[in-house]
Each structure stands twice: as C-alpha cells, then as structure tokens.
Amino acid sequence: MNKSRAQLFRLVLTIGLILTGCSEQSAPPEPAPQAPAASSPGFINIVWKVSESPSVAPGTLYVFLSDGTLLIASPHGKPAVGTWREGGGILTMVEEGVPYQVDVLNVSHDEFRIRSHNPGKPAEITFVPAEKPSRENQ
C-alpha cells in the first residue's frame, strides 16, 4: 500500500471510529415524519461514499460534520477540508475557499443525492453510506 493510500485509510478509519464510538449503542429511534427545515439535516456526521457522479470519482468520501466542517477524502488525491452550512433551506458548500449552493435531491438512511452548482455545469452526486471497518481490522 503506498503512503498516500495508507494515510487515506488511516483518515477514514479515524473518522469512522470518531463517529461510531467504541461503546455499544441501542437501536436508532424510528425516523420522524418530515422534519421542519430548522432541524439538523439527515446527512450530518455520516461518512458518505460517492457511488455515482459525472464529476467526482466513485469511492470519494465526504463527511459533513455537525460543526460545519466538510471532510473530503479521494482515493486518488490528498484529503481536503472545507466547510458547509445550511440556512433558510439552502445548503452551501465551500471547497478550496469557493462557496457554491447545493440542491438536496434526496436524503435517506441509504442514499444522499445532491446537485452542486459549483463553477461550470451543475453536477449531481449520489452518495451511499461508507462501509464501516470491521472490528478485526481495528
């Protein structure tokens, strides 16, 4: 495994451990009916993996942390840190200092689909939850 892939693996493993914790957790509560816009979006603090996109490499990982930090880890590049915010029904992502609006097309426990209006042609990105590392690999 080359050095950058090893670093990416360690970053993803660390993010997974932080988000899942080390203790047993009870079953998640039943999902609430359509949440009001003021509540937290359903995609935060989840490690998402790009499954389909014309502009982002499949396998790229995105994590929208609850503090507004955006972590992006590509299988072919260095990890990046940006920001995100949601307000007034508008999601804004900031990557490499460039803010752009994002339409949330679908959010569920098994899919997160967006249309980003970054410079150039708008691009759709479909995410699925990233696989959690098995206990024997920790």
Image: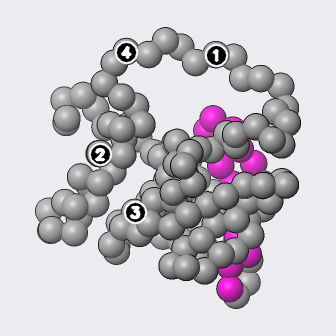
Q: CA distance from mark 4 to mark 1?
A: 15 Å
**Does residue 114 appear anywhere in the picture?**
no
Q: Of marks 3 and 2, which one's residue comes earlier in the chain?
A: 2
Q: Which residue is mark 1?
A: 29
Residue at (41%, 69%) from the top-left corner? 80
x 83%, y 43%: residue: 37
Asked whether the residues under the numbered discs 3 and 2 touch, taking CB atoms below 8 Å apart as contact, a structural biologist would say no
Q: Earlier in the sequence, mark 4 or mark 3?
A: 4
Magenta stretch in the rendered image: 105-119
Q: Are marks 1 and 2 in contact (CB under 8 Å)?
A: no
> Which quadrant of the structure image shows residue 60?
bottom left
- Where does label 3 land, which residue? 73
Disc assigned to residue 131? none
Amino acid of disc 3:
Ala
Which color mode does the image show?
one colour
Query: Viewer-proximal residue, 121 or 81?
Result: 81
Foreground mark, 3 or 2, reads: 2
Read off the residue under disc 4. 24
Task: Please tell me whether residue 98 belongs to the stretch shown in magenta.
Answer: no
Q: Secondary structure at mark 4?
A: loop
Question: In front: 94, or 28?
Answer: 94
Q: How far apart are the two marked residues, 4 and 2, measured between alpha carbons?
A: 18 Å
Disc on the earlier residue, 1 or 2: 2
* Label 2: element kind: helix
Counting residues from the start of the chain, the first of labels 3 and 1 encountered is 1
